[in-house]
């Protein structure tokens, strides 16, 4: 509501400054209220989220340049940060949707006035083509669609030009939220088909460089490895028109520089700083630091079942009691997180997720357990962590090393570069003791267990296998949370995880951003990319 | 004619090194840990999609077979596609090489402009406190890691003193790169007659160029001092001095000209060294050059990108050395015929 | 140089002459004197460092993290509350070890290859020469990165990588020196006296190439330390928690903007002083052994 007023007033002022390009304007970022400058360590490497090899920062393109059928509402946290609300699914391209009487299909009515960036109308044909593409190209998009039981093109049909229908394979609480994740973007299929070839029926080659969407922003300029410039799409109908005309996203690899830029007022938003910087910036109070605990995510220590000592539950418990949790929370999280240690009981009282595990630092207890397990003299183990996440995992690993030393377990630290990490930790699952940071997009504990505790799944880097957990996850994953079996099932899963501790959580991290005081409309999203659509900039 | 013969001969001599580079780089990239197929397949990929990607990248073939295919591509001038950016390597190099070259050249100009006068100054007053001071200053420059100098400069000149623009790469946020002619922003903006952009680009390049330049002052100044000393001690200089020529004329027209050859050799070495040392400075200043590209490529085991980078640097190295040799024959026509 | 048997008093007098020359060079050049003193200090710290530091360089204490320099912690504390002073001192040994082993390795291999190639010429020369050219044509830092990334970031691999990129310099110098002297009179004389090639190379030619190589050695020692620091900066350095200057500077650099300058400054200063010392030492050695400057 305020946004509209703002536009009216700023239209006159900004109109003068908005001459064709920005060249030669004074370089004070804070002075330009039609442009937001964002700095981050890595930018997109593709315009197409469906392509293999597309990196995480590229998901921001899917969010800002494309629409989905549905989106999520928002809520405000106690600390003032706005975050999306996973319980509140709201219209985006679809005006409304209805579940069939038998609960086995859903019909979406599309907005009649929506257009793509080239001006052509959005039709149900486009929606079907886009969904078909997401489930057919393979790799990450297909896997993500599968999580919502969206598996084959036959499930999707066009009822009329503005009505689209999904037939379910099974009833699942994950289906509708999965339609709102960045993957099922709606693509301008007519434009895409012009660039499709027999070998490349989904126009992957073309869309890798050229976005074909209808979202709130268009890509004005993309210099890979340098910057991406978004320009507002003034005919956007799927939501309130964004308050800023242009968003410049620059890649600045050095975290120190990103901090300096926000402190000096040369950037409006700075992303991905170490927790320490966010804490200091928040304390200094010159800029706003907004943070929300990342849903369904924990920084944790994984113990690999293939490593002999860890096959013994007592050893795993001993390790869990030897972690200097408080020190890690101080020196790795700098308080920007929620402790995941010191839980009261081995039996979970609620199904809140994530919740503290019932362990705390207790070296005597750890030594006893270790002796009981037959490892009185300890053993040797390498602790591995990902070079890319060294800012939190290196101090954490050093402190774990010290803690283990106190119970006679010798360890060495092993820094693994990014490409190798995925191979060793997730695919080969060969790291005996390692730092983990998995976070699930869909915010359900059973979804976390599906990825992390179920045997053979990618993020189960611990090679953990428990028949009861396997059965519980199978039974619970698609169950609606209202189902009477849901809560007892999840509680049982948590209880097993508490008792068996193949995974020892430290804390739930925050996703923080630093913004100038006059920048409004930041919102935390599960995909952890910056949604620039709600950003607004007032007077400094 | 002879000069062309020499160039031809040098080129043939360089061929074995280039072949060596191709083989070593190929083996080195294959020895990198980490499976590019896994990386490329992205998060949440299952075994089947990883296998598909591996086949698509040709990594399921045997090493000799892969090498043969790579050679075939090279002959066609195809450096492959970078998996981390999804763009042809040649395209990446073409956009990034000018950035690195521009930075290196500006750094070199700074280094020459500082080191030569210092070297000459030291040579004309050997073993005085001026000589010692020069030596200490240039040695201090070579003693600091470049990334440290860079970060330190950013802190002092940008963060504290507000003298330098934000370290955001080649050009400030609110400027648009000049139209592409040479790829060098400084030159392109002048061609376009756009002095504002020139100033902006120049302001951005000063700090990274100086951080790099400081590091190579020492070899240049040292060599200048040594060869000037030798020249100044020679008979013809004494004769020139005795015949009453002015001091500056003796210094520059006679001594310096004769001292130029070893300086030129050092210059060639320094230049190729700097191209390799770009890596760190580019990382600090968010400079979109090939150095930072190479580092990222190595970390993610992006084979094609690493191979393309090393190969282009090696070719550049050969070309620079050749250019130095040709310059040699211009400075001193007596050399060169025999190669 | 090639004199094998010398009466004792002669050795003494040549030693005395050398000492006199050393004192002359040092007295004429205070900077060199300074460099020698500095070098002595570093060697002392490398040997005795771990015994003289006030704190355990590995012991963390998160309750006193990031404290500025004080009487208790001369160089302040780092993000885990470790004493920076102790870490800087203890790091001397590791850094010197990396530098010395890398340079020793390339010195030995390089000079042997260079000697063989200069002495025999022909195919040996061509193969060695081309291999060296190949290494030279690599962007050296990236080659070091590649080697460490491929083999893993252990101290040994950092040493190997540094040794390989330094190899060409030694090979070239050795080759050039041997090549010049191959036809010299004393070599022919030794040959006629029935010396084998191996003996000739080891006892007659090899000693001659040492002086010019010594200068290179001292310059390379500094460069080796910088190289390790650069590797640390991109995350391919020595494994934590071992204190090492490069990694301390690299990690400390991220704290500069937030005002905790002591984390990077002190290890940076130690690193700079060490490299500085090696470089000045190189100049000093050149003065010492350069016959042109002998008086």
Image: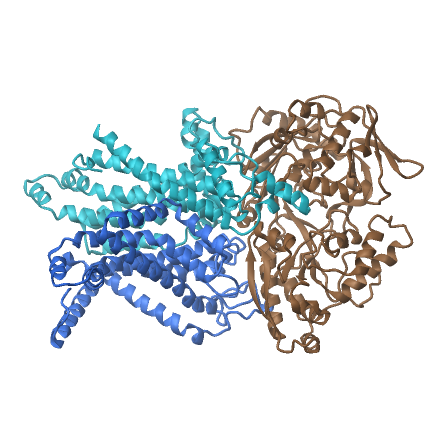
Q: Is residue A366 above or below residue A450?
A: below
- Identify the image quadrant of residue A428: bottom right
* Viewer-closest of B84 and A295: B84
Chain depicted in cyan: B
Residue C201 in the image: state x and y as whole percent. 21, 60
Q: Colour of chain C?
A: blue
Can the viewer see residue B246 in this picture? yes
Q: Colour of chain A?
A: brown
Residue C227 in the image: state x and y as whole percent. 41, 55
Name the side, left or right, on which A266 lies relative to C91.
right
* Viewer-closest of C13 and C60: C13
Residue A446 in the image: state x and y as whole percent. 80, 53
- Identify the image quadrant of residue A499: bottom right
Q: Is residue B206 above or below residue A162?
A: below
Considering every residue shown, the one lying at the far right of the view is: A101
Quarter of the image with the N terminus of chain B in it = top left
Residue A30 in the image: state x and y as whole percent. 59, 38
């Amino acid at each position: 509501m305020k946004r509209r007023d703002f536009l009216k007033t700023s239209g006159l002022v900004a109109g003068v400054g908005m001459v064709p390009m920005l060249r030669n304007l004074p370089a004070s970022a804070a002075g330009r209220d039609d442009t937001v400058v964002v700095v981050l360590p890595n930018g997109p490497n593709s315009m197409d989220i469906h392509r293999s090899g597309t990196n995480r920062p590229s998901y921001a393109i899917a969010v800002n340049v494309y629409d989905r059928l549905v989106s999520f509402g928002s809520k405000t946290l106690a600390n003032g940060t706005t975050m999306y609300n996973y319980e509140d699914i709201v219209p985006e391209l679809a005006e409304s949707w209805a579940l069939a009487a038998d609960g086995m299909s859903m019909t979406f009515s599309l907005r009649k006035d929506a257009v793509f960036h080239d001006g052509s109308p959005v039709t149900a044909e486009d929606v079907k083509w886009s969904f078909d593409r997401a489930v057919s190209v393979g790799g990450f998009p297909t896997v993500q669609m599968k999580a919502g039981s969206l598996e084959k093109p036959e499930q999707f049909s066009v009822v009329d030009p503005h009505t689209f229908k999904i037939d379910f394979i099974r009833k699942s609480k994950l289906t509708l939220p999965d339609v709102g994740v960045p993957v099922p973007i709606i693509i301008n299929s007519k434009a895409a088909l012009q660039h499709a070839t027999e070998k490349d029926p989904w126009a992957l080659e073309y869309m890798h460089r050229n976005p074909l969407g209808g979202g709130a922003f268009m890509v004005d300029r993309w210099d890979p490895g340098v910057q991406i410039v978004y320009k507002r799409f003034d005919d956007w109908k799927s939501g309130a028109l964004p308050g800023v005309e242009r968003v410049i996203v620059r890649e600045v690899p050095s975290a120190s520089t990103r901090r300096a830029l926000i402190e000096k007022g040369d950037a409006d938003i700075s992303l991905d700083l170490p927790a320490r910087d966010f804490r200091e910036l928040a304390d200094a109070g010159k800029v706003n630091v907004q943070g929300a605990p990342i849903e369904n995510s924990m920084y944790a220590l994984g113990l690999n079942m293939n490593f002999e000592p860890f096959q013994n539950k007592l050893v795993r418990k001993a390790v869990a009691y030897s972690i200097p949790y408080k020190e890690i929370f101080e020196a790795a999280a700098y308080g920007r997180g929620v402790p995941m240690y010191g839980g009261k009981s081995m039996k979970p009282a609620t199904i809140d997720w994530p919740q503290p595990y019932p362990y705390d630092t207790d070296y005597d207890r750890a030594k006893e357990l270790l002796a009981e397990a037959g490892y009185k003299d300890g053993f040797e183990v390498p602790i591995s962590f990902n070079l890319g996440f060294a800012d939190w995992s290196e101090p954490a690993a050093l402190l774990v090393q010290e803690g283990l030393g106190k119970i006679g377990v010798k360890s060495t630290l092993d820094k693994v570069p990014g490409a190798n990490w995925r191979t060793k930790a997730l695919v080969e699952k060969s790291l005996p003791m390692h730092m983990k940071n998995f976070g699930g997009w869909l915010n359900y504990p059973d979804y976390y267990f599906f990825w992390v505790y179920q045997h053979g799944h990618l993020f189960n880097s611990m090679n953990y296998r428990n028949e009861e957990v396997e059965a519980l996850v199978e039974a619970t994953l698609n169950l609606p949370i209202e189902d009477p079996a849901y809560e007892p099932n999840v509680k049982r899963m948590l209880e097993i995880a508490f008792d068996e501790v193949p995974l020892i959580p430290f804390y739930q991290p925050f996703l923080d951003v630093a913004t100038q005081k006059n920048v409004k409309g930041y919102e935390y999203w599960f995909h952890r990319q910056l949604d620039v659509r709600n950003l607004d900039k007032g007077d400094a | 004619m002879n000069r062309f013969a020499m160039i031809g001969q040098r080129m043939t001599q360089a061929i074995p090194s280039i072949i060596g580079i191709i083989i070593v780089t190929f083996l080195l990239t294959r020895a990198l840990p980490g499976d590019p197929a896994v990386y490329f397949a992205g998060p949440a990929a299952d075994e089947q999609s990883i296998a598909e990607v591996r086949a698509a990248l040709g990594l399921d073939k045997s090493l000799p077979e892969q090498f043969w295919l790579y050679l075939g591509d090279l002959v066609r001038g195809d450096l492959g596609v970078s998996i981390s950016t999804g763009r042809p390597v040649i395209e990446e190099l073409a956009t990034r090489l000018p950035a690195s070259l521009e930075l290196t050249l500006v750094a070199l100009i700074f280094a020459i402009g500082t080191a030569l006068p210092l070297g000459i100054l030291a040579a004309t007053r050997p073993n005085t406190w001026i000589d010692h001071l020069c030596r200490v200053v240039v040695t201090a420059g070579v003693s600091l890691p470049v990334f440290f100098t860079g970060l330190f400069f950013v802190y002092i000149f940008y963060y504290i003193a507000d003298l330098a623009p934000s370290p955001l790469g080649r050009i400030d946020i609110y400027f648009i790169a000049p139209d592409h002619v040479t790829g060098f922003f400084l030159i392109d903006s002048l061609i376009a007659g756009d002095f504002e952009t020139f100033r902006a680009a120049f302001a951005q390049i000063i700090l990274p160029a100086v951080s790099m330049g400081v590091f190579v002052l020492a070899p240049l100044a040292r060599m200048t001092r040594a060869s000037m000393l030798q020249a100044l001690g020679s008979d013809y200089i004494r004769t020139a001095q005795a015949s009453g020529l002015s001091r500056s004329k003796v210094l520059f027209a006679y001594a310096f000209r004769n001292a130029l050859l070893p300086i030129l050799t050092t210059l060639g070495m320094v230049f190729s060294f700097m191209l390799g040392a770009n890596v760190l400075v580019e990382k600090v200043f968010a400079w979109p050059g090939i150095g930072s590209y190479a580092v990222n490529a190595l970390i993610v085991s992006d084979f094609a990108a690493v191979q393309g980078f090393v190969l282009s640097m090696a070719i550049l190295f050969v070309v620079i050395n050749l250019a130095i040799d040709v310059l040699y024959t211009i400075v001193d026509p007596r050399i060169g015929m025999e190669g | 140089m090639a004199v094998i048997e010398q009466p004792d008093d002669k050795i003494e007098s040549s030693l005395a002459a050398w000492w006199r020359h050393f004192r002359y060079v040092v007295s004429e050049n205070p900077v060199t004197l300074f460099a020698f003193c500095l070098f002595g200090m570093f060697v002392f710290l490398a040997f005795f460092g771990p015994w003289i530091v006030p704190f355990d360089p590995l012991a963390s204490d998160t309750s006193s993290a990031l404290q500025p320099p004080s009487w208790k912690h001369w160089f302040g504390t780092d993000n885990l509350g470790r004493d920076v002073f102790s870490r800087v001192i203890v790091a001397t040994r590791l850094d010197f070890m990396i530098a010395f082993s890398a340079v020793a390795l390339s010195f030995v291999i390089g000079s042997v290859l260079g000697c063989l190639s200069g002495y025999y010429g022909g195919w040996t020369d061509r193969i060695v020469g081309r291999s060296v050219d190949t290494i030279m044509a690599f962007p050296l830092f990236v080659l070091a990165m590649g080697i460490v990334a491929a083999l893993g970031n252990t101290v040994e691999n950092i040493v190997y990588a540094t040794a390989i990129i330094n190899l060409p310099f030694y090979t070239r110098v050795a080759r050039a020196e041997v090549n010049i002297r191959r036809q010299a009179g004393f070599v022919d004389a030794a040959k006629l006296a029935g010396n084998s090639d191996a003996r000739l190379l080891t006892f007659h030619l090899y000693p001659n190439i040492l002086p010019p190589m010594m200068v290179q050695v001292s310059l390379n020692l500094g460069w080796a330390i910088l190289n390790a620091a650069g590797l640390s900066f991109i995350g391919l350095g020595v494994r934590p928690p071992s204190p090492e200057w490069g990694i301390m500077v690299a990690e400390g650099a991220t704290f500069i903007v937030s005002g905790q300058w002591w984390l990077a400054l002190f290890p940076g200063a130690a690193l700079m002083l060490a490299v500085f010392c090696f470089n000045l030492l190189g100049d000093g050695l050149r003065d010492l052994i350069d016959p042109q400057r002998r008086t």
